[in-house]
Image (tube, rainbow, N blue to C red):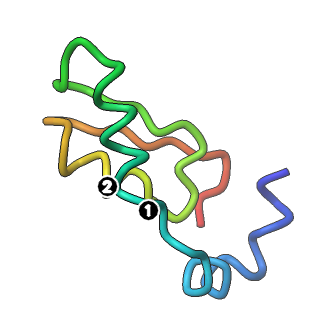
Amino acid sequence: MAEHFLKQAKQYSDSRPSYPSQLFCFIASKTPSHQLAWDVGTGTVQAAQSLAEIYENVIGTDASEK
């Protein structure tokens, strides 16, 4: 699936809407510790960047290098 976005990765990143901050507050409220978060399928890293405001460490992984 990741290969479908390779050609338009930059355009996708530039036009993708952001997530509301309430989403990350909700996620944080469900975790007992804020030492580490893992953003699976991080893509444009938008979620990882928001998680980094709450968690000490964030790991983002994605099948696509772009």
Give the residue at x 29% y 26%: 29
Query: Where does residue 63 sit, x and y in percent of width and height?
Result: 66, 46
Q: Which mark is residue 2?
A: none
Which residue lies most toward the top here?
Answer: 32
Query: Where does residue 53 sit, x and y in percent of width and height?
Result: 18, 51
Query: Where does residue 37 sit, x and y in percent of width and height?
Result: 33, 30
17 relative to 4 in the view: left or right: left
18 relative to 36 in the view: left or right: right
Give the residue at x 34% y 56%: 21
| Element under disc 2 | helix
The quarter holding residue 8 reads bottom right
Instruction: In the rendered view, tell whether residue 34 sits above or below residue 7.
Output: above
Query: Where does residue 46 sit, x and y in percent of width and height?
Result: 44, 62
- The 10 Å Cα crowd at callout 1, few under 14, some 14 to 19, many 20 or more, is some
Front residue (pair 39, 5): 39
| Element under disc 1 | helix
How many marks on residues? 2
For label 1, the residue is 46
The quarter holding residue 31 reads top left
Name the kind of residue labelled 2 in the image: Ser
Q: Label 2 to label 1, Cα distance in Å?
A: 6 Å
Q: Are marks 2 and 1 in contact (CB under 8 Å)?
A: yes
Front residue (pair 22, 49): 22
Give the residue at x 55% y 37%: 40
For label 2, the residue is 50
Name the kind of residue labelled 1 in the image: Gln
31 relative to 17 in the view: left or right: left
